[in-house]
Image (spheres, rainbow, N blue to C red):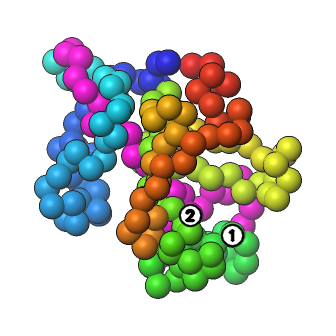
Amino acid sequence: MTLNNLKDANNWNHELYTKKSPLWPYCGNAAGIWKCPADHTTAINNLGQRVPRIRSMSMENWMGGPGWGNSGPWVPNANSGWVVFMKQSAILNPGPSQSFVFVDEREDSINDGYFVTEMDGYPNPATTKIVDYPASYHCGACGFAFADGHSEIHKWRDPRSSARSRSP
């Protein structure tokens, strides 16, 4: 698999991107939390050197936003529609223990820190589109971090999530 843009500084420069994140002050200066140890992909830095990519985690688009316009209207951008959770205290349905915030994103899908969960077509799986793909670093599985602080690894059963089902 290939990355979208190996030379993009977002793939290798913590100083310009990760450390300027609003979440950085809560990281305890631990840049490694943004990357799954099983992700062995690399990027090319400004010196032309191949270096380990700095991030494989992305944040769910419905957590902090902005929402995904292709899914239709979203709150608080509109008066009704899908909800973008702006505060942890607002995560009531389905609740923090069932709402993921971070996910391992697949190396050929990750292009920013925003993991799109497309809601257009829900609840009909036949019409649902996958925009960003979850990783499968762990024997066809990836990690999720939930709003209540726990994490889980889920193995993919739907072939649309499989690394084999998408060409680079």
Q: Position of residue 19 (x, y in %)?
A: 21, 52
Q: Earlier in the sequence, mark 1 or mark 2?
A: 2
Which segment is the magenta one?
Answer: 48-73
Q: Position of residue 41 (x, y in %)?
A: 35, 24
- In the image, residue 131 sits, relative to residue 114, either above or below, namely above
Crowding around mark 2 (Cα neighbors within 10 Å: few <14, some 14 to 19, many 20+) is many
Crowding around mark 1 (Cα neighbors within 10 Å: few <14, some 14 to 19, many 20+) is some
Q: Which residue is mark 1?
A: 82
Instruction: Answer whether residue 167 is magenta in the image.
Output: no
Using residue 43 as the reference point, say whether residue 57 is left or right of it.
right
Q: Is residue 80 visible?
A: yes
Closest to the observer: 48 or 32? 32
Residue drawn at x 58%, y 50% as measured from the top left? 116
Using residue 97 as the reference point, say whether residue 18 is left or right of it.
left
| Amino acid at dot 2 | Trp
Residue drawn at x 19%, y 16% as measured from the top left? 49
Mark identifier at residue 164: none
Quadrant of the rendering where the C terminus is positioned = top right
| Amino acid at dot 1 | Trp
Residue drawn at x 72%, y 57% as measured from the top left? 119
Q: Secondary structure at mark 1?
A: strand
What is the total number of numbered labels drawn onto the structure image?
A: 2
Q: Main secondary structure of the magenta part?
A: loop
Contact check, label 1 and label 2, Cβ < 8 Å: yes
Residue drawn at x 71%, y 32% as measured from the top left? 159
Residue 28 image-quadrant placement: bottom left
Instruction: Answer whether residue 70 is magenta in the image.
Output: yes
Residue 88 image-quadrant placement: bottom left
Q: Which residue is mark 2?
A: 62
Q: Position of residue 89 (x, y in %)?
A: 47, 85
Using residue 54 as the reference point, say whether residue 153 is left or right of it.
right
Closest to the observer: 93 or 76? 93
